[in-house]
Image (cartoon, rainbow, N blue to C red):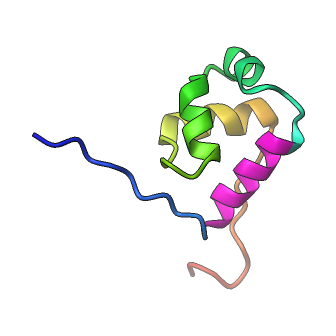
Amino acid sequence: MAKRTATPREGSPLIGVLKQTIRDSGLSLNELAKRSGVDDSQLSRFLRGERDISLSATEKLVQFFGLKLVKSKGKGK
């Protein structure tokens, strides 16, 4: 069976915020991986736009950085 390749969703606001937060952190990918529990190769592929990031990795990063997901007014009523 052929390996499936994820299609990155560059237009997603969540993806954009997460990538920018990682870049702005000033941490190396190795240090971020150690401190957040997310594999450095997964982080690298995500930042290069080669792969989507898993939901569990996203959750770890959101918790590590202290981010919150907030529903916009007028959306998803």
Residue found 77% across the figure and 18% down from its top? 31
On the image, the x and y values in percent for residue 11 come to 61, 70
Q: Is residue 51 above or below residue 14?
A: above
Magenta range is 12-23
Number of marks drawn: 0
Q: Main secondary structure of the magenta part?
A: helix
Question: Residue pushed farthest top?
Answer: 34
| Lateral position of residue 35 relative to residue 51, left or right | right
Quadrant position of the N terminus in the picture: top left
Quarter occupied by residue 14: bottom right
Residue found 80% across the figure and 36% down from its top? 65
Query: Does the magenta portion include 18?
Result: yes
Quadrant position of the C terminus in the picture: bottom right
| Residue 72 vs residue 5, the one in the foreground | 5
Question: Residue pushed farthest bottom?
Answer: 74
- Residue 36 at least partly seen: yes
On the image, the x and y values in percent for residue 36 come to 69, 23
Q: Is residue 64 above or below residue 31?
A: below
Residue found 50% across the figure and 49% down from its top? 50
Residue found 67% across the figure and 66% down from its top? 13
- Residue 38 at least partly seen: no
| Lateral position of residue 4 relative to residue 70, left or right | left
Query: Does the magenta portion include 38?
Result: no
On the image, the x and y values in percent for residue 37 come to 62, 19
